[in-house]
Amino acid sequence: MPRTSKRGIKLYNHAHAFHEIGFLLEGDCDWHMGGKRERLHAGELLLVPAGVTHYEKTAGRARARIGWIGFDFTDGYADVPALLRTPLSAGDYASEFHRLLDVVCAEQQGDAPGHAERAECALREILILLCRLSPAGTLGKTRGATKTLRAPRLMHSAALTLSGNLAQPMRIRDLAHYHSLSASHFALLFRKHQGETPRQFLQNARLARAKMLLMEGGLTVKEIASACGYVDAAHFCHAFKAATKLTPKMFRKTKAPK
């Protein structure tokens, strides 16, 4: 249920036989829990375990709007992970928490078929998302670390995309956009994790593929040029000779199986 804490309000110290999730929708609020004070800002959440005394307080002229949910899936304080007992940043899930909170509130107050089951499903989604959140104040650092860990995987995926689509007129900037990166940042990350620029990687992949097809001997030079993404046979021959000092036909003669 959402509620508004008026200016300077202090709720009495109390405890529940159930767990409670408090989601600060607007403003700032102090949450006194188990003898400790936790300051929450808009977009942050706190889980109060069952049996723990607590109260919320807004000081001076401050106002706050709070959404809260009480539930009882497990018994005992020890069942609540330590991380969930500290303020958590909703981050990218803020709108999703708002939506799920509205679902729980509406279904608990309604009487449509399956209303209790739908409210419980929404609550379970909330609990799953809680386990994905970062402690308040560390969201930027966590995001940076996550991006650092993801970069090698993203660049490996980009390399596979390039090498697996040699015949397609793929542009590097389109691939960068697909990975939600600018062309310059994408090129920087690609070189860092793949050892060469995207264009160098693509050129080397095309040449490697062309060499294999030339040695197999089943396609003409024109067909190989098309299969490897070159504009035409002339462009392919020029690029191939610049890289190998041999024309495609000369390479085929020297490298083809006897």
Image (tube, rainbow, N blue to C red):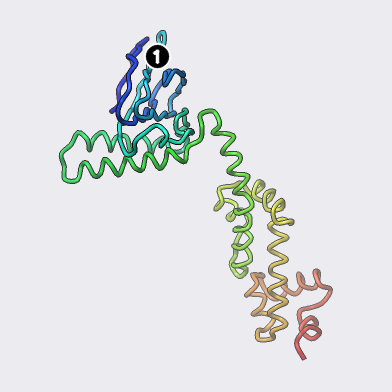
Query: Viewer-proximal residue, 240 or 68?
Result: 68
Q: Quadrant of residue 174?
A: bottom right
Up the image or down, 214 lies above or below 110; here it is: below
Query: Viewer-proximal residue, 117 or 250?
Result: 117
Could you tell me if residue 1 is visible in this image? yes
Instruction: State the residue at coordinates (40%, 42%).
Output: 128
Left or right, 5 with respect to 220, comes to left
- The percent coordinates of residue 231 (x first, y second) are 66, 70
The amino acid marked with disc number 1 is: Thr
Left or right, 158 with respect to 42, comes to right
Up the image or down, 115 lies above or below 221; here it is: above
Left or right, 215 with respect to 89, comes to right
Q: Quadrant of residue 206?
A: bottom right
| Residue at the farthest top position | 60
- Marker count (numbered): 1
Instruction: State the residue at coordinates (77%, 91%).
Output: 258
- The percent coordinates of residue 237 (x first, y second) are 75, 75
- Numbered disc 1: secondary structure: loop
- The percent coordinates of residue 230 (x first, y second) are 67, 70
Could you tell me if residue 28 is visible in this image? no
Disc 1 crowd rating (10 Å Cα; few below 14, some 14-19, many 20+) is many
Up the image or down, 29 lies above or below 120; here it is: above
Query: Viewer-proximal residue, 239 or 16?
Result: 16
- The percent coordinates of residue 175 (x first, y second) are 59, 55
Residue that mark 1 sits on: 58
